[in-house]
């Protein structure tokens, strides 16, 4: 791990979030949501989250938590409920208040995530904080925060579909250092619910001229689709040309292009202004 990067992903198991619906959307039991047990170490997925005295949207606010703030689950409460457009559980958690002292209160499940990264995502020499979580309409939301900016001006976000489609799914995130790729990247890997496909989506965070203390833009740089639907198999082996800011993907395609045959295609993508454009492909 590069010294400039603090990779804060919790749990020893795969770091995934699941949010999906089956059957009638009006039935609370139709929803599959990630659940967290007492003792789980998680993070706040949004900025300026309200830690409430009781498990109720109208309850008194005990503290306001910033994006990426660590919390510890004390208890999962009752049954899942609907708050606005989201179906989830209320959790009692312990966090640090604005004075640095421990404070215990309640947050709704959509405010929690195990997926948090801290690093220099825009190459300005200062660290940003990123979180990944699922939205109520089954999108993967990537948020990047500039900690030194005022609360109303410090978070940029991008929504991605799990695998490009589907009524929900799972996601995980990792960091690709500029020393490897030539530019810093976030890699979001997603699988739509009930599907044999998955996507690798590379994300850039851009601030013009690497200006410090300025909010940038989160950009979808490239998505690579994979498939496991025997006898068809599609996989991408990715490498980088750091000096030229290129991404090379060797696509192994079995049974889709030619029935029963395995075909390998080499794709070369050039990064510019946050987006990878394909230069050429060859067998």
Image (cartoon, grey):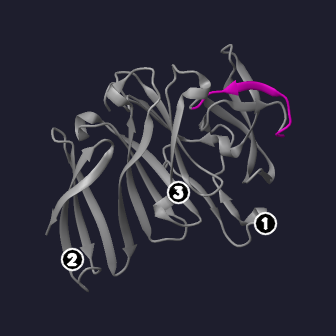
Q: Are marks 1 and 3 in contact (CB under 8 Å)?
A: no
Q: Confirm whether the magenta stretch covers residue 265.
A: no
Mark 2–mark 1 distance (CA, rounded to whole Å): 45 Å
Q: Secondary structure at mark 1?
A: loop
Quadrant assignment for the C terminus: bottom left
Q: Residue furthest bottom?
A: 259
Closer to the chain start, of discs 2 and 1, is 1
Is residue 123 among the parts visible in the rendering?
A: no
Question: In front: 117, or 36?
Answer: 117
Closer to the chain start, of discs 3 and 2, is 3
Does residue 17 lie above or below 22 as drawn?
above
Closer to the chain start, of discs 1 and 3, is 1
Mark 3–mark 2 distance (CA, rounded to whole Å): 29 Å
- Please give the residue where the numbered disc 1 appears in the rendered image: 27
Quadrant assignment for the N terminus: top left
Q: Locate residue 132, reporting x and y percent.
A: 52, 44
Q: Could you tell me which residue is drawn at 30 percent across and 36 percent down?
A: 177
Question: In front: 149, or 235?
Answer: 149
Q: Could you tell me which residue is drawn at 85 percent across and 35 percent down?
A: 54
- Please give the residue where the numbered disc 2 appears in the rendered image: 262
What's drawn in magenta, residue-wise? Answer: 56-67
- Dividing the picture into quarters, in which one does residue 139 lie? bottom right
Q: Is residue 53 left or right of residue 93?
A: right
Mark 1–mark 3 distance (CA, rounded to whole Å): 21 Å
- Please give the residue where the numbered disc 3 appears in the rendered image: 170
> How many other residues sit within 10 Å of disc 3, few (<14), some (14-19) or many (≥20)?
many
Q: Secondary structure at mark 3?
A: strand
């Amino acid at each position: 791990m590069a010294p400039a990067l603090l990779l804060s992903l919790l749990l020893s198991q795969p770091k995934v979030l699941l949010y999906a619906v089956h059957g009638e959307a009006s039935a609370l039991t139709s929803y599959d949501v990630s659940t967290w047990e007492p003792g789980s170490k998680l993070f706040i997925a949004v900025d300026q989250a309200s830690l409430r005295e009781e498990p109720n949207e109208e309850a008194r606010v005990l503290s306001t938590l910033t994006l990426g703030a660590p919390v510890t689950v004390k208890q999962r409460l009752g049954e899942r409920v609907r708050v606005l457009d989201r179906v989830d559980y209320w959790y009692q958690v312990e966090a640090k208040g604005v004075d640095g002292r421990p404070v215990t209160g309640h947050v709704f499940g959509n405010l929690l995530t195990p997926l948090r990264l801290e690093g220099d995502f825009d190459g300005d020499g200062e660290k940003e904080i990123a979180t990944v979580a699922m939205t109520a309409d089954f999108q993967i939301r990537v948020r990047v925060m500039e900690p030194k900016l005022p609360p109303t001006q410090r978070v940029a976000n991008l929504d991605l579909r799990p695998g490009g489609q589907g009524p929900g799914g799972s996601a995980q995130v990792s960091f690709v250092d500029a020393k490897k790729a030539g530019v810093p990247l976030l890699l979001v890997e997603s699988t739509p619910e009930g599907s044999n496909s998955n996507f690798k989506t590379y994300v850039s965070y851009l601030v013009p001229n690497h200006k410090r203390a300025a909010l940038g833009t989160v950009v979808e740089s490239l998505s690579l689709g994979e498939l496991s639907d025997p006898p068809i198999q599609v996989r991408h082996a990715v490498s980088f040309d750091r000096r030229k800011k290129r991404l090379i993907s060797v696509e192994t395609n079995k049974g889709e292009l030619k029935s029963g045959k395995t075909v390998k295609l080499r794709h070369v993508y050039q990064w510019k202004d946050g987006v990878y454009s394909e230069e050429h492909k060859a067998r």
